[in-house]
Image (spheres, grey):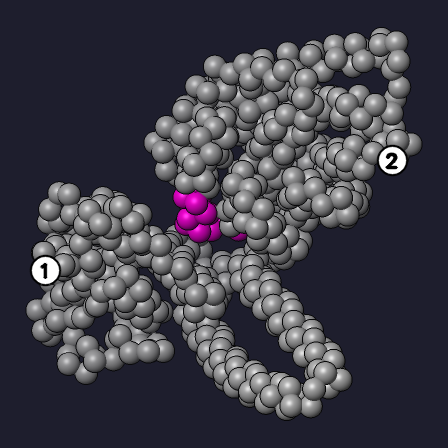
Amino acid sequence: MNIVKTYFLTLSSLLKKHLLILGVALFVPIQNNAQQNVKDSLKEQLHIKRSQPRFTTKDTLYIDLINALGNEMRFYNSDSLFKLSNQALELSKSSDYKLGENKALLGLGDYYSDKGAHKKGITYYKKALSLGKTTKNQELILKSQNNLAGEYGYKGDYAKALIGYLEGIDLAKAYGDSLMLSVMSENIANLYISQKDYVQALEFYKIVKKINQEIGNEIYSAETMSNIASLYADMGQLDYAMYNVNSSITVFEKLEIMDWLAFAYQVKGKTYLKENKFKWAIYWYSQSEMLHKNLDDDRGRIDLLNGMAEAYFGLKQDDISERYALEAFEVSDKLQFMEGKQKCAKTLYKIHKNKKNFAASLEYHELYQRLSDSLSSNENKKSLTLLETKMEHQKQKQDLIEVNRKQLAQQRNYVNAALAILLIFVVITFLVRRSEKIQKNLNTELKGKTTDLEKSEQELRDINRTKDKLFSIIGHDLRGPIGAFQGLLKLFKEGDISQSEFMEYIPKLRHDIDHISFTLNNLLTWGHTQMNGAVTKPSVVGLESIVKDNIHLLSEIAQNKSIKLVSQIPTNTLVWSDSDQIDIVIRNLISNALKFTPKNGMVTISAQEKGQYWQVSIRDTGIGMDAKTIERIFALNSNHTTYGTNNEKGTGLGLSLCKEMVEKNGGSIWAESLLRKGSTFHFTVPRAKKSYRKTG
């Protein structure tokens, strides 16, 4: 059976579907280096089965071979997938073969999904999931859950998509299925990519890469690297993109995995397009286009066609660019893919403008604007929708646990009552003793319920306090910059300011957007720790590499203010901590130091051994703080906010988040400062020892 990783199509990136062969039939010889051999082998085995003297269509192995062949034909001839899946469904029903029926329903769901018929795709995936639960087939339950969530994503219902993936992850953990845990974690990463939240997406990809390393399959790792390369290309980190895509291409070419190779060539073309190397972009897009001639994958062609259109437009070959853009528009329209149509409309608008065909240019520009407004409206809602959906999912889980607890308590009461009645007829004295014991149990249970109630009340107060703080930050620190941006755009649109005046605001706008991005990242991380309780997973971590990565990440901000960033971390500075949490602490402290340091200043990061700990210090030559400010910056539920030397705005979350994560890792954090001299933030973290490594 094929397990399909479902991803979302975005304007800037087309993320490929994973096709992972698990081996359906015992006698299907899978040859990784030739996908055509797989199809030929399946066809040969079907021919052998039909030619046997006592052949019957109710043979379950024969039905499995039909389903397997249909899945292999999915990206080569979708009509064959439809025909074979229907055939397998009819034979399975006539044979009462539930497993074959389940696989056939999944095949039909895949067919309608690829055709953009979301309603039918969802219908068949729901039937497959229901049947999988009836037969208790864990593998098919997980695949149905994943595909159903993915189809909701294609439809644009991100709330249902996220709930589906979260439920699937819970099931994968319960079943101990590392592969599907990787699949669904990667799909959640791509939910964040769909809303351009690349930082959160990379966090999930770190999880996926760790799981893939544990699985140890080079094909799975190569597929993930292809998607990461596409993400890096969208982020503008083109060196990382090229490294990952070249690594994946090596695997796909060696094993002749043509559908994935077509996608990898396409990502390489997109990377060159981002560098404005149009000829090289066309070369690699053309390699992908040649492979697509033998594939039946309309979704996979949309970004390819749009990329070809942009590359030829860059070479001023407008006629060829128009042909590719119109073809992409036609496929996007067939699949009801708004973001694909938006990108085509933008290219066609520019082409007709060059040709001085102003009527057509205006028509495509208006279409592009309508689609952009619609998508922008959706984008504004996605982040909060994801957060609210996750909270709702956690609440549903807690409600289910509470219901089960009450049912168990009720069952215990029934048992106790039955025993009490039985004991009445045995001996009166035993009844008295039993009654005393029951009373004692009831008192204990009452105390437990009282404790649980108090705990629930405290959790509710914490959630309300967290909610109030979230909306306070959103209303105070995000709505202002966004409102200013909207007002400026309105002035420009209505002609109250000229283009040159508008361009003068661009640096300020970029600064505001950077602030919003950093704020959202801290907000999501803090919200996660407050609402779900972040789990600290310590391991041996090299402090030097974490500091180096964050210096690289924040170097542009330092350069803009002519601030010198210096790391004095000794080599082999190993600590015992959660790498992700310490990374967030260091990033926030360096960012704060840059924010409050004037131009031509210096920020220094150092570390000293202090007994069983490393003491890490971030020192700046900034404006400093008075004693009152130092007392309240780490206070619980503090929302203290100060503007930086260039009027940079913060959320007040950073230092409280740092304090929480340092303490979770067994350390402490404090600050020293003198006004107009600068500040130094210190925190401690346990040193790595041999005993730690053995425990890990």
Residue 504 coordinates in the image, percent (x, y): 35, 55
Q: Answer with mark 2 or mark 1, whichever residue precedes in sequence.
A: 2
Q: Residue shown at 25%/64% (left/top)?
A: 666
Magenta stretch holds residue 201: yes
Q: Residue shown at 9%/60% (left/top)?
A: 610
**Figure quadrant of the N terminus:** top right
Residue 311 coordinates in the image, percent (x, y): 51, 26
* Badge 1: residue crowd in 10 Å (few <14, some 14–19, many ≥20): few
Residue of label 2: 96
Residue 22 coordinates in the image, percent (x, y): 61, 28
Q: Helix, strand, or loop for circle 1?
A: loop
Of residues 489 and 422, the one nearer the viewer is 422
Of residues 671 and 695, the one nearer the viewer is 695
Amino acid at the residue labelled 2: Asp
Amino acid at the residue labelled 1: Gly
Closer to us: mark 2 or mark 1?
2
What range of the chain is rendered magenta? 195-207
Residue 512 coordinates in the image, percent (x, y): 38, 60
User: Can you tell which mark lies on residue 270?
Assistant: none
Residue of label 1: 611
| 481 on left or right of 387 | left
Magenta stretch holds residue 221: no
Number of marks present in the image shown: 2
